[in-house]
Image: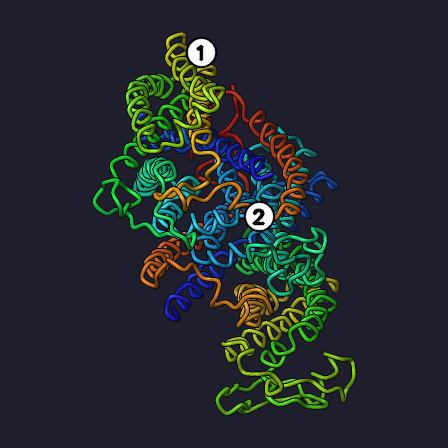
Amino acid sequence: MGTIWFCAVAFMIAMYVLLDGFDLGAGAIHLWVAKTEEERRQVLASIAPVWDGNEVWLVAAGGTIYFAFPALYASGFSGFYLPLMIVLWLLILRGASIEFRNHIKSAVWDPLWDFLFCASSLLLAVFFGAALGNVVRGVPLDASGYFFEPLWTNFRLGEETGILDWYTILVGVLALLALAMHGALWVQLKTSGAVNSRAGKLAGLAWWGVIVLTMLVTAVTFKIQPQVKENFTTWPVGFVFPLLAVSGIAGVAFELRRRNERRAFLASSAYLTGMLTSVVFGVYPMVLPAREAAYSLTVRTAKAGDYGLKIGLAWWILGMILAAGYSTYAYRSFAGKVAIDKGSRG
Amino acid sequence: MGQALDVHRIHFAFTITFHYIFPQLTMGLALLLVYLKTKALRTGDEHYDRAARFWGRIFGINFAVGVITGIPMEFQFGTNWAAFSKAAGGVIGQTLAMEGVFSFFLESSFLGLFLFGEKKLGRIGHWLAAFLVFLGSWLSGYFIVATDAWMQHPTGYRLGVGGAFELASFWDLLLNKWAVWQYAHTMLGAVQTGCFVMAAVGAFYLLTKRDENYGRTFVKAGVLVGAIAALLQLFPTGDMQGELVADQQPVTLAAMEGLFESRAGAPLAILGQPDVEKGRLDNPLEVPEILSFLTYRQWRADVKGLSEFPQTEWPDQIPLLYYSYHLMVGLGTIFIAVMVVAALLLWRGKLYDSRWMLWMLMLCVPLPYIANTAGWMTAELGRQPWLIYGLMRTAQGISPRVSAGNAWFSLIGFMGLYTVLGILWIFLLYREIELGPAPDVHPRGEEAAVLATE
């Protein structure tokens, strides 16, 4: 039962990264791909109807962790207290900049929100990557099942780790580049004209960074977290996940050259899915690895009571089918490229 | 640990109080949007569609602030109240996760369609989008209230092996009778906020002699729905809540009423200042025997005072609890008076010309916000010193490793950010009201038109 919920949570987090990932990425790059007011509005219009729904995956994943793995929720959220608070502030600023910008037209109003939108999206991508890095590296859990990490200590992977060290920062930068590429491919898919071609170029540039950092981070990860190597040697079938990532990233380059915008975006989604599932597969059965292996939280030690988990499965599956239905409908309704009606601007 | 406990409590109190400014209007307006769209569908009159578009813009701003201030609420269970989450997550994680899975996806998908897709959806489709946004937001309210109700009156749980609570009965958790009545009472409060806001904007237009046809529509909708909600707020929902408190949390009832000594034929204190040290109510203005009657339906019934209970069981903020409760009840009574008189004037066809009543409606707009906040404070302060009533003390629930200094850091951050957010919210709402519901006044054009596709 714990393993089923482990997969369910992983699924929701992957959905979050794929969906909110493109609007985070779009935010991070929009200052560079969109220069004029009209171009900026094109980028915003490509995410305006869906970003909020994308962010729901984060809230729903959080709620599902709370329900299925209460001990993980308690320990992880309180241990990552400081970065989570900063993430919350960034999410608030970002939401405000998307929603408030278009209510007023003024030479001081728009640039302010454009800047905040970009800065908060950028930093969120880095922080989410660093968070993932922390989980892989392991946190200083002790016998009480709790820990608390400062934002940084000496940036080394020593005894007293901080949220940011050279490894987690590296993962953060990789996350930023990967989401920038993902976002650029989305913007390319949804826009036309100058924005479209700039986004395509930027995705191609980001691709190089993603390739280099992916190889680097993968190599380091095998060193840092021994469980990863163990899992891949015990169950070689797990290699499908990294294979998915590799074919995804290759697909991005291939489809970019062939100018197939939809497939390029899908390939980037495959890359992100492959990377995430590889990590999840690599740390299983741990849900939160500790620096001292004995204190790691595992699927078995962190899960809630079985009766609740069984009942939950019934409504969770129903809820996911419904959610998939609404989002598909919403995305279909806004399918195609955004068109800015120039006459409507006063 | 005492200091950290206080900061964590203020942290939650501050962020939840600020957050709830937004959902109460969202949930109230969602119902009124369905009302306006239904009118539009039945009369075929474009006037109601424009009215709904105007309120849709206000709804959108309000909803956005509600979403971004809502995410911190869910996170805080884990960040600031880790010990509580570890103990109770197996039970209330159910309702919180269901809120995400069932309400938020529904709400966010169809709000996008409601705000941006009117042309594509057609008349019936657009009505349906409004209805599903309403359904999503009201479902969300239920899951949150059911979570709180479990903390007020735990049902459907058992103690698991590791010392954490486990779910024992899904339906006992979901259909907790406390949840059902608290939900009805909470939602009526939200409807009144929506009604007072809509009526106030309408009154503003009528008093300033602009957009008067819209003004009449708004005042009428606000007053009709508001009068019904104000009455139902008192009876049966408020009455049933009081009965549940008297039955399940008698010490809370005594503290709310400022009743220090047990009395047969207990009076209802309308005014007065509780002096906890001396154990009495100063300067009391009382109506004899009413409290006994309201609680037990008998004039001479015995109501237990605080002195019957050990001091360790008393809520720790008795004066604040007492004032919150009295403020809520007092304002609720005023709402009934204002709404019923306005409804009578409407029925006699005199409301739109009676300037004093329009002034009254316009100036009342902050009051339902205060009443709803006071109501929640009554519920949550009344639950003290328990975090889960009878099972876990508030002091036991905080995160063991998060120091007072770290909690202050984030509290100060939220205070700053929310001040800015609050100013922007008022500024943008005022601007939308100033621009008004007439077509072609919006400088950014109709957003719906922006998203036409190739």
Residue A260: which numbered mark, if any? 1
Q: Secondary structure at mark 1?
A: loop
- Chain-order first, disc 1 or disc 2: 1
Taking the spot 36% from the left edge, 54% from the top edge, the residue there is B417
Whole-percent x, y for residue B302 in the image: 72, 87
Whole-percent x, y for residue A323 in the image: 61, 34
Q: Tell how many labels.
A: 2
Dot 1 amino acid type: Asn
Depth order, front residue of B363/B388? B388
Taking the spot 51% from the left edge, 59% from the top edge, the residue there is B84
Q: Quadrant of residue A244?
A: top left
- Is label 1 in contact with label 2 (beta carbons under 8 Å)? no
Q: Quadrant of residue B310?
A: bottom right
Judge the density around disc 1: few (<14), some (14-19), many (≥20) Cα neighbours within 10 Å.
Answer: few
Q: Residue furthest top?
A: A258
Taking the spot 54% from the left edge, 92% from the top edge, the residue there is B283
Cα distance, mark 1 to mark 2?
46 Å
Residue A304: which numbered mark, if any? 2
- Quadrant where the image shows the C terminus of chain A: top left
- Quadrant where the image shows the N terminus of chain A: top right
The chain under label 1 reads A
User: In the rendered view, does B203 fall on the left or right side of A153?
Assistant: right
Dot 2 amino acid type: Ala
Depth order, front residue of B102/A277? A277
Q: Secondary structure at mark 2?
A: loop
Instruction: Using the rendered image of the protein, determine whether residue B192 is visible from the camera's viewpoint.
Output: no
